[in-house]
Amino acid sequence: MTNSDCLKVENLTVNYRQVEALRNITFHVAPKRVTGIIGPNGAGKSTMIKAMLGLIPYQFGSILFHSQPLIQQRQYIAYVPQRSQIDWTYPATVWDVVMMGRVKKTGWLKPFSVMSRVIAKNTLEKVGMSDFCHRPIGELSGGQQQRVFLARSLAQEADIFFFDEPFAGVDQKTEAIIFNIFRELANQGKIVVVVNHDLGESINNFDDLILLNKTLIAWGNKEEVLQEENLYNAYSGKVSFFSHNSKFVA
């Protein structure tokens, strides 16, 4: 792995609605790792990935992939937003949603190829949603909806995957499916970035963590980040973290 293989964020500063949301954030995200972004409510986790994706402006800094601005390489990116940001009344079936992931490869207003349809079918099978192919997306449970959008992201055949709180409101089966797919993507050499609000058992599924509270508190492997001092600085008080064999209280 070379340094250019990493996703590099340097001195990122974001003012959102005239309020400083992030200040001088610098970190690198390596491929072949599942990286979680954690921090308290209002820490700027979702704001940061939106700024990285060019969905909101930032005042200063750079976001580079292969030594080029990430915003110029959207063809390599898959993004799954928070469920609360999606219009679930939109009249689309599960199949329609997954095929949306093939639009960049196909081109606007062009017919989908047989290969695109095969890829979409395979991604639905991978997330266990083949039987719901013709179901309107709005009729599914929260966990099922999240799996469909995960399938759409897989259909994009991207190099960088961003997921914003994918585990909110999902069942344990769905959480396990999602984490297994994250691990598969990492093993394939992909960059996987996940906003996560939970400091419970699921934190063990991440390789690296980025701990925020408007500034960067810590980043690196999870053992380095999940230190009492870092948690105290991020959460400004008492917070408990439980893992298989340890308990942190800051």
Image: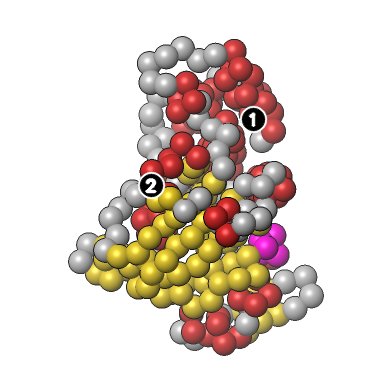
Horizontal side, residue 231 vs residue 74: left or right: right
| Residue at position x 33%, y 48% in the image | 55
Query: Residue 163, how many percent across, how many down?
Result: 52, 50
Determine the CA span between mark 2 and mark 1. 26 Å
Residue at x 55% of width, y 82% of height: 230
Q: Is residue 204 magenta?
A: yes
Percent across and percent down for residue 212 are 47, 72
What number is the disc on residue 123?
1
Residue type, numbered disc 1: Thr
Q: Main secondary structure of the magenta part?
A: helix
Magenta stretch: includes residue 134: no
User: Which mark is on residue 71?
Assistant: 2
Query: Which residue corresponds to the image point at 47% horizontal and 21% vertical from the top-left?
Result: 106
Question: Image quadrant for the C terminus?
Answer: bottom right
User: Quick one: 169 or 215, which is closer to the camera?
Assistant: 215
Q: Could you say where residue 67 lies in the image, as x and y percent from the top left?
A: 47, 53
Within 10 Å of disc 1 (Cα), the crowding (few <14, some 14-19, many 20+) is many
Q: Exactly how many numbered labels are in the figure? A: 2
Vertical arrangement, residue 19 with respect to residue 104, above or below: below
Q: Pick the residue in front: 24 or 46.
A: 24
Q: Taking the image as drawn, is residue 112 in sight?
A: yes
Q: Residue 148's image quarter?
A: top right
What is the span of residues highlighted in magenta in the rendered image? Answer: 202-207
Residue 177 seen in the figure? no
Q: Position of residue 192 (x, y in %)?
A: 59, 51
First-in-chain label (2 vs 1): 2
Give neighbour class at mark 2: few <14, some 14-19, many 20+ (Cα, 10 Å): some
Q: Look at label 2 and name its amino acid.
A: Ile
